[in-house]
Image (tube, rainbow, N blue to C red):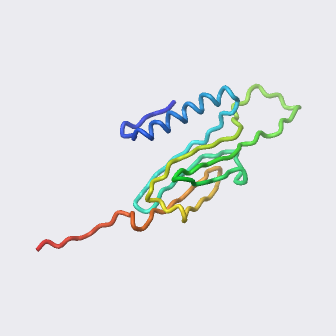
Amino acid sequence: MMTLNPLFKRNDLFQVLGREFDDFVGAFNGDNFAPQISCKSDENQLIIKAELPGVGEEDVELTIKDNVLTIKGEKKKEQEVKEDDYYFSECQYGSFERSVKIPDDTNIDKVAASFKNGVLEIIMPKKEEKKPRKINVKIK
């Protein structure tokens, strides 16, 4: 179930609705693995985290084109063991692709990514000239 923040920009709303639609359609294709993503920003950097449980680092590809970060990969299904009796399985498998528009003030030449405990973390520093700065003005 999606929750909406009333302060969302229109593009954010379309991104959320697009993801919900992709999840809905994926459920009918048997290909409904979609990683959850969080994105936060401070005055120095943009941090994006994607939850990728059961996905190997070697199965993830990151690209940036036209200020859009794309996380692409595949969660591979484990080989079935025939002697086990499964009652049901809620595990999701398949290929996935998530795209996030990144702000213009991001320095894409200095992007760093790490993968630990099934969480992909992408850190993008902000450009020096775009960082907010404080100027003290003397009153005469």
**Measured from the top left, where is residue 125 in percent x and y?**
48, 63
In the picture, measured across the screen, residue 136 lies left or right of residue 90, that is: left
Is residue 84 placed above or below 114 in the rendered structure?
A: above
Specify whether 69 is left or right of 79: left
Q: Position of residue 133 (x, y in %)?
A: 33, 66
Residue appearing at x 72%, y 54% in the figure: 58
| Residue drawn at point x = 45 percent, y = 40 percent | 12
Q: Quadrant of residue 64?
A: bottom right
In which quadrant of the rendered image does the C terminus lie?
bottom left
The furthest residue to the right: 83
In the depicted structure, whether residue 3 falls above or below residue 120:
above
Near-viewer residue (29 or 36): 29
Using the image, determine if residue 65 lies above or below residue 30.
below
Specify the farthest residue to the front: 66
Say how many tags the image has: 0
Residue 55 screen position, x and y as percent? 70, 47
On the image, the x and y values in percent for residue 35 come to 61, 42
Relative to 73, say whether 19 is above or below. Answer: above
Task: Give whichever of 18, 77 is nearer the camera.
Answer: 18
Toward which corner of the image does residue 105 lie, by quadrant?
Answer: bottom left
Q: Residue at x 42, y 57 (%)?
A: 42
